[in-house]
Image (spheres, rainbow, N blue to C red):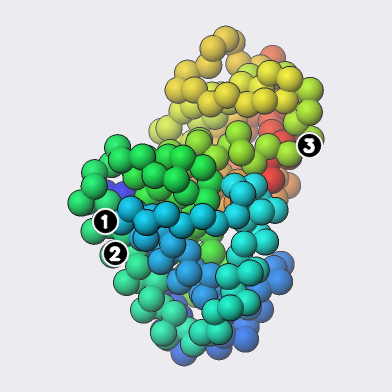
Amino acid sequence: MTPEDAIVATADRIAALLQAGADPRTPLPGAEWTVGEAAAHLALAGKLMADIGAGEDRPYGDGTPSGLAAANRAALAVYPQRDPAVLGAEIADSARDFVAAAADCGPRKAVLTPMGPMDMATLGSYLLTHLLGHGYDIAVALRGPHMVDREVVAFTLPFMRQAMPRVVNAGAAGHHACYLLRIGPDRFAVTFADGVPTVTDTPPRRPDCTIAIDPVAFLLLALGRWTAPAVMARAKVVAWGRKPWLGLRFPMLFTAP
């Protein structure tokens, strides 16, 4: 599977859930949105990213979690479509439009996105992450199979790595520590200096804490769908090193976008 395959397959799985008689009024567990609103948001976001990939200038929020949330509310307020079948088709179509645009311009083309500048390959990772997060919510609400698995999570990591410095919260103030993350076969380091994180392929020094976490658990924790206690209860994570207790603090240093 390629990243492009993962984008299209994930969008198609979301569309299938929405087109199987979904009630748009069904609330999302733990969220303010309904299924219809989440699907409308995915349709709007898919069009936004396809347009960005095609070279259009599409400002959206200020790149912070609160700014993106405000932009999402404003966009939904002026977009009345809530029919799950219609929105499912739009989600699937926009995913294909993005993949086609990405193929035309190549993975290294620089674009400006709601989460700052990135190349097209990373924007594709962003789109996939976004589909998986909201698709998971829709699947849970509709009691259907979700589309988050180990193989597709690997394709979200380029975006997750780039986004980390943008979603640090006040809890990181003054923090100094070096973490090594082991997410399935993937590895990268996050080093905090006075609350500012730097993400690198390898640790610049001996890690204070190594965190090994199941890929699905990592994504759902990072996106705020699971909590750290839930991940630990499922035995999906282990931490060790000179300061293993920092493993508990790490997810609390970020606010899910």
- Can residue 213 be seen? yes
Q: In percent of the image, x 51 and y 30: which residue is there?
A: 182
Residue at x 30% of width, y 37% of height: 108
Q: Secondary structure at mark 3?
A: helix
Residue 101: x and y in percent read: 26, 56
| Residue beneath disc 3 | 170
Q: Looking at the image, do the residues carrying marks 1 and 2 touch, with CB atoms under 8 Å apart?
A: yes
Cα distance between the residues tagged 1 and 2: 6 Å
Across and down, in percent, residue 75 comes to 58, 70
Query: Residue drawn 65% across and 68% down?
Result: 73
| Above or below: residue 70 compared with residue 204 | below
Q: Position of residue 54 (x, y in %)?
A: 31, 56
The circle on residue 97 is 2
Q: Secondary structure at mark 2?
A: helix
Residue 217 seen by the camera:
no
Neighbour tally class for label 1: few under 14, some 14-19, many 20 plus, Cα within 10 Å? some
Number of the label disc, if any, that sits on residue 101: 1
Q: Residues within 10 Å of mark 3 (few under 14, many from 20)?
A: few
The residues tagged by marks 3 and 1 sit, at their Cα atoms, a distance apart of 37 Å
Query: Tag 1: residue type?
Result: Ala
Residue at 63% over, 69% down = 74
User: Which label belongs to residue 128?
Assistant: none
- Seen from the viewer's position, the closer of residues 245 and 109 is 109
In the rendered structure, which disc, 3 or 1, sits on the residue that comes first in sequence? 1
